[in-house]
Image (cartoon, grey):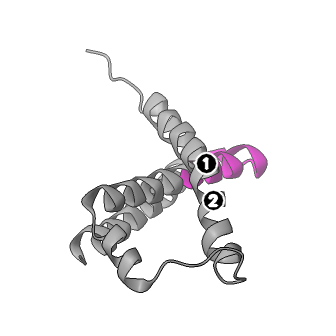
Amino acid sequence: MARRPMEPFLWLLFSAGGVLSALLIPALLLLFGLAFPLGWVSPPDHAHLSAVLGQPVTRVVLLGLCVLALFHWAHRFRYTLYDGLQLKHLGRPINLFCYGAALAGSAVASYLLLAAW
């Protein structure tokens, strides 16, 4: 049997991470970076945020956001090094660095979001 390339799966992670990051991260930054600190919107109290973060669905959504954003970064950075800097001769180390960093960051995010609660 012919070996199937991983490229379509990596492009899927890239596009899913880009879409999810483009939708959720600006909203979270607007709320927690500007609206709550500047008093535009009354911030939720600590008990309410703790209750929301205590829900398994919230933790899974945040984990998905972190993992997909990391793989989006890895794929974009890989192709920046390949095409932008013309480092195609270093393909294997670049792949190991980019996707290894995304996997390590995903493991840290998984530990912090799922095991710490």
| Depicted 26 relative to depicted 3: above or below | below
Does the segment drawn in magenta span residue 85? Answer: yes
Q: Which residue lies at the image location 49% right of the left edge and 61% below the top edge?
A: 97
Would you say 68 lies left or right of 84 here? Answer: left
- Per the image, the residue denoted by label 2 is 27
Q: Which residue lies at the image location 69% right of the left edge and 82% below the top edge?
A: 39
Say what amino acid the circle numbered 1 marks.
Leu
Q: What is the total number of numbered labels drawn onto the structure image?
A: 2
Does the segment drawn in magenta span residue 7? Answer: no
The image quarter in which residue 52 lies: bottom left
Would you say 40 lies left or right of 16 here? Answer: right
Disc number for residue 23: 1
Please provide the residue range marked out in magenta.
73-89
- Give the SS element for disc 1: helix
Residue 40 spot, x, y in % from top left: 72, 75
The image quarter in which residue 36 lies: bottom right
| Depicted 63 relative to depicted 53: above or below | above
Residue 96 spot, x, y in % from top left: 45, 56
Per the model, the C-alpha gap separating discs 1 and 2 is 7 Å
